Amino acid sequence: GAGVSQSPSNKVTEKGKDVELRCDPISGHTALYWYRQSLGQGLEFLIYFQGNSAPDKSGLPSDRFSAERTGGSVSTLTIQRTQQEDSAVYLCASSPTGAYEKLFFGSGTQLSVL
Amino acid sequence: QKEVEQNSGPLSVPEGAIASLNCTYSDRVSQSFFWYRQYSGKSPELIMSIYSNGDKEDGRFTAQLNKASQYVSLLIRDSQPSDSATYLCAVNAGTYKYIFGTGTRLKVLA
């Protein structure tokens, strides 16, 4: 595709429900990132995928958060038993190889937990 | 101490003036530095990248890097109302992990 695609663009859910957020990176980009941006805050690193290597999950805030990347392309971020503090914009980014490079961001998923 | 620090602003400048945005970082081994612009409700987009000490110019934008002082700045000349946005500083220590500051909100007054 022409850019990084994220879906849904908006998600409203009730506290305690599970949600899945999807990211389709730019074709050929081996590096894929998930960031979280709370209102008025900077970008908080969540997880990084590079090719077929084991992902760096060091930024995931709790074990309610998990992510996978299938076939080195599409990634899904899953949040189980959502809490109100999970409300934020979840941004996905990709880059050709992952170091010293520009990150290409998707338009994000606005998650609201009621 | 935060890894990447920016003044949250807002920084208000009149149209046509120079806007100066600053960023400090704590990791001395950081090797690459990026400025992203983020309009309200939109995703970040890259404005400038800089890897060596000194100045790098691109149109109305100049990035300045001083590794000894662990300081990187972005100058915007002839500021326009369309430059009003949040500017995010990002630092990479030679690995895949990009650490972002909280951003500086710039307002250019017409």
Image (tube, coloured by chain):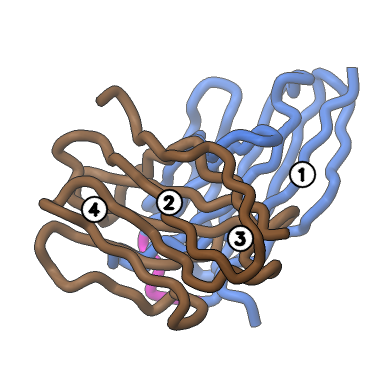
Chain colours: A brown, B blue
> Mark 4: which secondary structure?
strand
Q: Is residue B100 above or below residue B108?
A: below
Q: Over which residues does the magenta segment extend? A: B27-31
> Mark 3: which secondary structure?
loop
The chain ID associated with circle 1 is B
**Amino acid carrying mark 4 in the image:** Ala
Circle 3/circle 1 CB separation < 8 Å: no
Label 2, on which residue?
Answer: A21
Q: Tell me what residue is drawn at x 60 percent, y 34 percent.
A: B42
Label 4, on which residue?
Answer: A31
Mark number, residue B105? 1
Out of A54 and B12, give the one closest to the viewer: A54
**Amino acid carrying mark 2 in the image:** Leu
Is residue A104 found left or right of B13 in the rendered image? left
Label 2 crowding class (10 Å Cα cut-off): few <14, some 14-19, many 20+? many
Q: Is residue A1 above or below residue A8?
A: above
